[in-house]
Image (cartoon, rainbow, N blue to C red):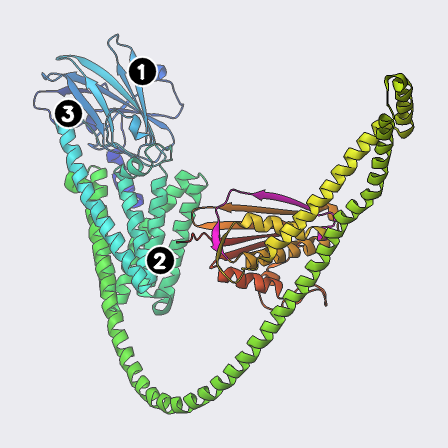
Amino acid sequence: MKYLFTLILILTVASISKATTSQENILLVLDNNLEEKTIGKHILIYQDSDNLSFDEIIEKDSFNTNQALIPNLGLTTDAVWLKINVQNKSSITSFLLDIEYPMLDEVEFFYPDSNNEYVSIYLTETFLEKRDFNTPAYVFNLSLLKNETKTYYLKIKNTEQILLPISIKTNQSFWSSVSTKNIINGIYIGIILIMFFYNLFVFFSVRDKSYLYYVLYVISTGLTHMGIQGYSLSYFFPTINIDGSILTIYASIAGISVVLFTKSFLETKFNAKKLNYGLSLLTILFSASLTLIILGKNHIGFSLMQMATTLFSFYILIVSYYFLFKGYKQASFIALSMSILLIGAIIFLLKDFGILPYNNVTNYSMQTASALEMVLLSFALANRINIFRSEKETAQEEVVLALKENEKIIREQNVILEEKVEERTLELNKTLGDLKQTQSKLVDAEKMSSLGQLTAGIAHEINNPINFVSSNITPLRQDIDDLNSIMNKYEEITDAENVKEKLNEINQLKEELDYDYLKTELTSIVDGIEDGAKRTTEIVSGLRNFSRLDEGELKEANINEGVESTLILIKNKLNGIKVKKELGEIPTTECYPGKLNQLLMNLIDNSIDAIHSKETDNKEGIINISTTANNEYLFITIKDNGIGFNNEIKEKLFEPFFTTKKVGKGTGLGLSIVYSIIEAHNGGIEVTSNEKAGTEITVKIPIIKHG
């Protein structure tokens, strides 16, 4: 709202703010009475459309004088050069040059050093932490000995209007003004935050969109005014090189918010349709301004925002007075608040153009008016709650009467309903009992089916190593007979006379029997028999661990053992499928080991079926099984690259009797039993699956220690 009326006033006061004719250099004299001096009339101005260098600028004699105390150079894409001739007649040797307009994009200060060679200090709107002074304004040190005269230059660029409230101050005067400024802005920020959080809280309570638009307006307007004072960039973006057009974005958002607030608060869509079209057009203008700024069209976006703000200021008064004429008292708050804001804007702009003096009253007139406006709009919203409360009380009285009539009917109906409910409850209890019996039988049938498959697999697994042992007995016996033949030859050596002869016979017999191969073959046969015996022992041990006759009782167990035993028993079903185990170091936990083994068997069996169902070679099938733990839970993850399934199947996955297998290959109770086992352990299960890509199931079991 800072740019309100700019388009109108600039036509009448432009002559005040612009330079007129070329003049000789103006000398600014500093005396002992100086504390703070606004020097707008003592500066020379040159608008650089040719992008000249500093060396070229100091040769220029076409600098123009300025007649305004606060020069306002309007919108320009050119760089503006300022020339200041200063003579020190005071006993003070250190001063501060202060440009109290933080919205300038770039300011470069040129000053002569001890060798009378110019040195520059380059500052931008952002990166405030790099400045010598912790303040959003542009401040530079001036060092002049008594009776010394120096010439200083400033190069200024800005995407928005160039306003130059420039002054020379003593250090004490400067920090005093900074302190005053911080106090005033702190009060303003406090009002903004109070209005924001209070009305945001009310919005969450009443869910009225008017409050939401209001809080958006409050925060965006607050950011705009703080940006004008340089505080938003200082506190929100201190190290980011963000364009100064962010303030135009804030102002556009504030415009959109206040238009939406007006439409919602006055309900113009229903109460004034023709006026509502005008408000919608203003929303489009503010949105277009916001879009242009985002696209980098800063000047066009800025001008459009100014125009939309000016139009809105007049239009909202028309709308509010129209509603007052129609007897809508709520509009008085908007009319009064906007009138106050207009007065504050006019005072602020008249100060910018030098018509009014530059002081704290005029400088903060816009912020003061903005704070009063927000308070009045907040009062309007509070009054709106009173209206809603009155309407609600009337509606509640009507509802109470209706409820009393309905209560009588309900009492009569309740008697009949209770009788019917009792009858239905008896029927449902009987049906539920029948269902439980049927479910129990089906679960037993599923267990028997699994047991039959398991038994056949175990028989096959045990048969292989036993056949291997039995098939090696005959060659073992033959090799032992050959060894005995050689040993008997050694026993025929009776005295020293026939040793040589017998040794020759023994060597001849070794060659006939291929003694070296005989030793190798014996080792291989014994290793094979040993391997078959170990394999049989593993199967029997796995069967014993899997069966866990104590499954009806809680017992400390290690889930890794259950994984190992389950894989041993189900090995014959893999048929080329690779199993990759990553069993972590996990603690034991109190559980039902037999039930967990059944859970593992069902999940691995499903993964095998999913891979078999995929139209690929089983040798490409992979099942990954991993176990991990944290402080609270054990995790079992089984992942396959099988056929997978979609979300529709996932939703029904644990329903009893639901199966994707062909008729006769599954009862649909496997995963239902898995789910009941997890519930018995107070655990959880997560399933992720993609069609044609496989399935991953993670089971979570809480870690419980005995005692």
Q: Secondary structure at mark 2?
A: helix
Depicted 450 relative to depicted 120: above or below: below
Q: Nearer the viewer, residue 168 or 230?
A: 230
- Name the residue beneath numbered marker 1: 58
Task: Locate the C terminus and report the quarter of the image it occupies.
Answer: bottom left
- Name the residue beneath numbered marker 2: 260
Residue at position x 52%, y 63% in the image: 552
Mark 2 and mark 1 lie on one chain; the one further toward the N terminus is 1
Magenta stretch in the rendered image: 573-591
Q: Residue furthest left?
A: 33
- Mark 2, mark 1: which one is toward the viewer? 2
List x then y, in percent, for residue 585: 51, 42
Q: Residue furthest top?
A: 115
Left or right: residue 279 compared with residue 444: left
Crowding near pointer 3: few (<14 within 10 Å), some, many (20+)?
some
Q: CA distance from mark 3 to mark 1?
A: 29 Å
Mark 3 and mark 2 lie on one chain; the one further toward the N terminus is 3
Q: On residue 171, which mark appears?
A: 3
